[in-house]
Image (cartoon, helix red, strand yellow):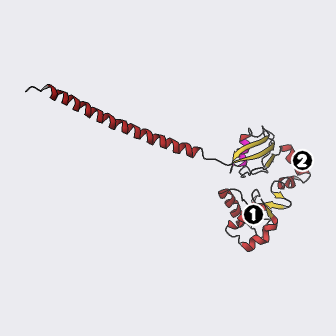
Amino acid sequence: MKFKKIEIIGIILLIFGIIYIIKIKIDESNNMDLMLETNTNEIIASSNNEEKTIIKVHIDGQIKNRGVVELEEGSRLVDAIEKSGGLTEEADTSNINLADILQDGEKVYIYSKQEVEELKSIGKLNEEIDNTTKKDNKININTATQAELEEITGIGPSLAQKIIEYRESNGKFKDIEELKNVSGIGDKKFESMKSQITI
């Protein structure tokens, strides 16, 4: 049976129509994939570009590059030392806490072995070290060691450890009243110690 010319043209048009529809579907699928990829990239970029709080810390003494370094909030002393090029061979870290969480505007001094020996010889080492944890004879609850925290009225070994654990989990105390968030420190205990502490 022979097809008429008009029927052949119709079949050709039908074939082209089907091809055209398939092409549209493929393009839509590709566009959808592209949109999904774009949205995913935007989400990742947005997540990566979230503003991080930057602090500035002055680090001096026995480090390779003295001066002010910029760090992310929550960084530790070891991070500042690393960013400053590391310690010199003469550095003595026996009396500092490398895991200490730093705060904006803080100054850290790394003593040399000779300086430590000289301070020990004149009985001034503890006094110099205390300058980093005490202000106006108050104990800085953000930087104090466990032994120093135990000097505070009402703070024993167990509670001092809880303060350090809280500090490590939540970052430095924003104000001294935040100390009441530590389990075991209520209003009454806080009142008895607040004149002895600072941040």
Q: Residue at x 83, y 53 (%)?
A: 129
Q: Quadrant of residue 32?
A: top left
The dot on residue 176 is: 1
Tag 1: amino acid: Ile
Q: Quadrant of residue 70?
A: top right
- Residue toward you, 41 or 152: 41
Q: Residue at x 92, y 52 (%)?
A: 122
Q: Quadrant of residue 160?
A: bottom right
Which residue position is annotated with label 2?
Answer: 118
- Residue toward you, 159 or 122: 159
Picture quarter with the N terminus:
top left
| 80 is within the stretch colored magenta | yes
The dot on residue 124 is: none
| 173 is within the stretch colored magenta | no
Instruction: In the displayed orientation, state which residue is furthest to the front.
Output: 6
Q: Secondary structure at mark 1?
A: helix
Tag 2: amino acid: Glu
Q: Which residues are magenta?
A: 73-82
Q: How far across and how far down the image is residue 95, in percent? A: 79, 51
Q: Residue at x 15, y 25 (%)?
A: 5
Q: How far across and how far down the image is residue 78, in percent? A: 71, 46
Q: Is residue 14 above or below residue 124?
A: above
Q: Is residue 120 above or below residue 32?
A: below
Q: How far across and how far down the image is residue 99, in percent? A: 71, 51
Q: How far across and how far down the image is residue 22, in percent? A: 30, 35
Left or right: 19 in relation to 149: left
